[in-house]
Image: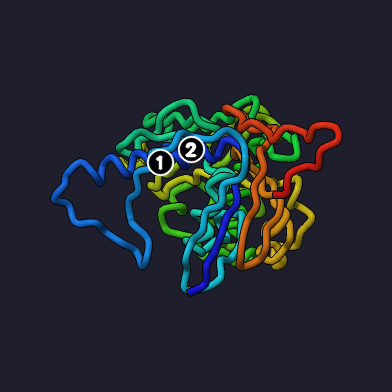
Amino acid sequence: MNKLKVTLLASSVVLAATLLSACGSNQSSSTSTKKLKAGNFDVAYQNPDKAIKGGNLKVAYQSDSPMKAQWLSGLSNDATFATMSGPGGGQDGLFFTDSGFKFIKGGAADVALDKESKTATITLRKDLKWSDGSEVTAKDYEFTYETIANPAYGSDRWTDSLANIVGLSDYHTGKAKTISGITFPDGENGKVIKVQFKEMKPGMTQSGNGYFLETVAPYQYLKDVAPKDLASSPKTTTKPLVTGPFKPENVVAGESIKYVPNPYYWGEKAPRSPPPRPGRRAPRR
């Protein structure tokens, strides 16, 4: 099997140490539990060492086939890459959820459902930016629908659930050039989007419901790429824009991703590696 690897820098090592410690404590809670293995590796491992600030963290994945780098969720179909894209924002997911996958406030965006008006109002954070420093806008959210509903992009994510959005079926079939059920109270460059539904569904309060999308795509960065070329464009495969705490510095097709801290991330920023001291060589990465 092919071995895939992802390299994270700076405080990512703290996150990994925490996760490993948590797994280890659960595994060791019962002395009678059989030690599980995946090949030659233990499924759970308790790391007794303290977290290290800075430095590099290397994480390896195994897959039956080379990972397919595609940073737009509507065009991606590779489960391994979906995991590997996590440090960059998980293909730019917007919402926070609780342990039951119910939407809660505090993420890159908040969603408010109104049963009476049959709408969902998505409000993007004012400080939400792409990794090049440009603003994430209402149009970026709508563009995600366009990449899925417009057959020219080649997405396989169109579903009957999405057809519950007013005007989206007409856009999908070419009867309309715009999506009438998606509007921008503050304009395309604003931070608020209203989605109009034909009817409300009980599952709309939870992530993964399928009735509205939970990601954004950088419209201004991608608008000049022909729809038929978008899935293979370097702008969506090896040179993407992201919203997460880390941004990909180098993507090797089918093999690896190297991340560095994203200075424009809206949340707690990962510390950047310090500059080399005068008279000393910079450490190799």
Question: Which residue corresponds to the image point at 45% horizontal and 29% vertical from the top-left?
Answer: 112
Res 18 visible: yes
Residue bearing the label numbered 1: 19
Side of 123 where 31 appears, left or right: left
Q: Which mark is residue 251?
A: none
Q: Is residue 266 above or below residue 156?
A: above
Question: Which residue corresponds to the image point at 75% horizontal and 35% vertical from the top-left?
Answer: 133
What amino acid type should be assigned to the residue bearing mark 2?
Leu
* Nearest to the observer: residue 117 or residue 244: 244
* Badge 2 element: helix
Label 2 and label 1: CA atoms lie apart by 6 Å
Question: Which residue corresponds to the image point at 75% horizontal and 40% vertical from the top-left?
Answer: 132
Question: Which residue corresponds to the image point at 52% horizontal and 43% vertical from the top-left?
Answer: 93
* Badge 1 element: helix
What amino acid type should be assigned to the residue bearing mark 1?
Leu
Looking at the image, the residue that sits furthest to the right is 279
Bin the neighbour count of mark 2 within 10 Å (Cα to Cα): few under 14, some 14-19, many 20 and up: few
Res 119 visible: no
Give percent across and percent down for residue 96: 45, 34
* Nearest to the observer: residue 176 or residue 81: 81
Looking at the image, the residue that sits furthest to the left is 32
Q: Which mark is residue 15?
A: 2
Give percent across and percent down for residue 35: 24, 56
Give percent across and percent down for residue 262: 67, 37
* Nearest to the observer: residue 147 or residue 261: 261
Bin the neighbour count of mark 1 within 10 Å (Cα to Cα): few under 14, some 14-19, many 20 and up: few
Side of 230 where 142 appears, left or right: left
In the rendered image, which quarter is residue 76 located in?
bottom right
Q: Is residue 87 above or below residue 70?
A: above
In the rendered image, which quarter is residue 154 located in?
bottom right
Side of 48 where 136 appears, left or right: right
Mark 2 and mark 1 residues within 8 Å of each other at the beta carbon: yes
